[in-house]
Image: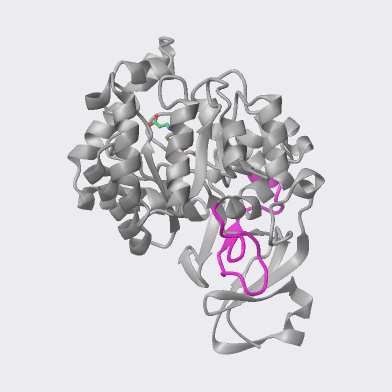
Amino acid sequence: MKADLLITNANQLVTAVGASDRPKIKHELADLEVIPDGAVAAAGEHILWVGPTRDLDKYLEAGPSTRKINARGKTVLPGLVDPHTHLVFAGSREHELELKLKGVPYLEILAQGGGILSTVRATQAASQQELVQIGVKYARQMLAQGTTTAEAKSGYGLSTADELKILAAIKEIDAAQPVDLVPTFLGAHAIPAEYKGNPAGYVDLVIEEMLPQAAQLAQYCDVFCEQGVFSLEQSRLILQAAQALGMKCKLHADEITPLGGAELAAELGAVSADHLLAVSDEGIRRMAERQVLAVLLPATTFYLKEPNYAPARKMIEAGVPVALATDFNPGSCPNNSLQLVMSIASLYLSMTSAEVINAVTINAAHALGRAQEIGSLEVGKKADIVIFDAHSYPYIPYRFGSNLVETVIKNGQPVMGG
Ligand code: NIG
Ligand code: FE
């Protein structure tokens, strides 16, 4: 076999291999395959071979054009997968930091026409080209921190034209830089100012006008189900309409108020329910029963200064499959580093380093329906590989706030470092 790319001598080569047809649950989440002095080879866009460096010569030939990277002393991981981001928005909201310190709650800022709605004004005013430029910048920041695939939600348009503009921008951003983007329609992110007092009218607009067009551009539909935003019943109507158009579902569920979002996600067979700080025991039970992924966003909890994190241990023990994501957005989480999320998850969700790594690789790939192609270092999968300046995988969450990424390989090509 002939390799185009060879990474050898990794102190730890973490494959994150699991069952490819379903996410890791319960004790499986702590199972992490690590090959000491490991090597990985790629041909074209795909992984050709994975194993101990000493066995390499038995199976592989290196030609004059083979690119060789010595990873001595380093840790090699599958490209990280971020299954919940609000990548496309204009402007920023650093002024809300001061309001937060004065004790103004997140939902109060929104109710006063700020928060999400202030980003909506900035995003409506931006052209598609401006959004592409901004989005490419953020996607490259994510790449530099080890993310090779990310979800990207719309949701700062809130009119048919602006929501479609954002989805079209996501497509352009995807093509313009290495991070693969999975588009999600989140037209139901807030009630726009012009529908204040008539939320049902906005729900109709989402279902009748936006969804049929968004279904051409987005793979998933998501709703911000929250007190004062979209009710459980409105969320159900929107997601059922999306399913009828062939879209898969996600839900911002039980983030601040326990409304029964987890139960709704289970009832609809959603791929994931996200946030879940206020999830009920019944919600956990139903998610486990239907194997709905819990996408946990602990950097948001941290940044909102919420006292209670999602009950990750309880969910893991109950058999709910767990993944982690950044929730990158201008209001509740202006961080786009999965490495920081790994540290916060380890400290405040009490997840072990092995669990955290499975949750940002193979389980995160499942949360985007991409686990057949990405999320682990396995023969035949895409050669999306990250080399960390870390002698062991637990060193990565340990060094919180630091970017340890040295080299990123996307589709078999070095795109950072190397
Ligand atoms: O996931 N919760 C709703 N949406 C985002 C926040 C968006 C914003 O504040 O701009 C979230 O936290
Ligand atoms: Fe979100």
**Residue 383 magenta-drawn?**
yes
Q: Quadrant of residue 90?
A: top left
Residue 228 visible, this angle: yes
Residue 141 pos. (x, y %):
42, 49
Q: Which residue is at 78% across, 63% downward? A: 36
Check the image and tell me how it is coloured.
one colour
Up/down of 357 relative to 35, above or below:
above
**Residue 407 magenta-drawn?**
no
Q: In the rendered view, does 60 fall on the left or right side of 31?
A: left
* Residue in the foreground of this view, choosing between 405 and 409: 409
Direction top: furthest residue = 102
Residue 297 pos. (x, y %):
56, 35
* Residue in the foreground of this view, choosing between 269 and 186: 269
Q: In the rendered view, does 400 fall on the left or right side of 159?
A: right
Q: Which residue is at 62% across, 20% downward? A: 308
Q: In the rendered view, does 355 fall on the left or right side of 179?
A: right
* Residue in the foreground of this view, choosing between 21 and 80: 21
Q: Which residue is at 43% across, 46% downward? A: 242
Q: Which residue is at 38% across, 15% downward? A: 108
Q: Which residues are magenta?
A: 368-396
Position of the N terminus by quadrant: bottom right
Total marks in image: 0
Residue 156 visible, this angle: no
Residue 14 pos. (x, y %):
70, 59
Up/down of 121 relative to 325, above or below:
above
Residue 22 pos. (x, y %):
69, 55
Direction right: furthest residue = 27
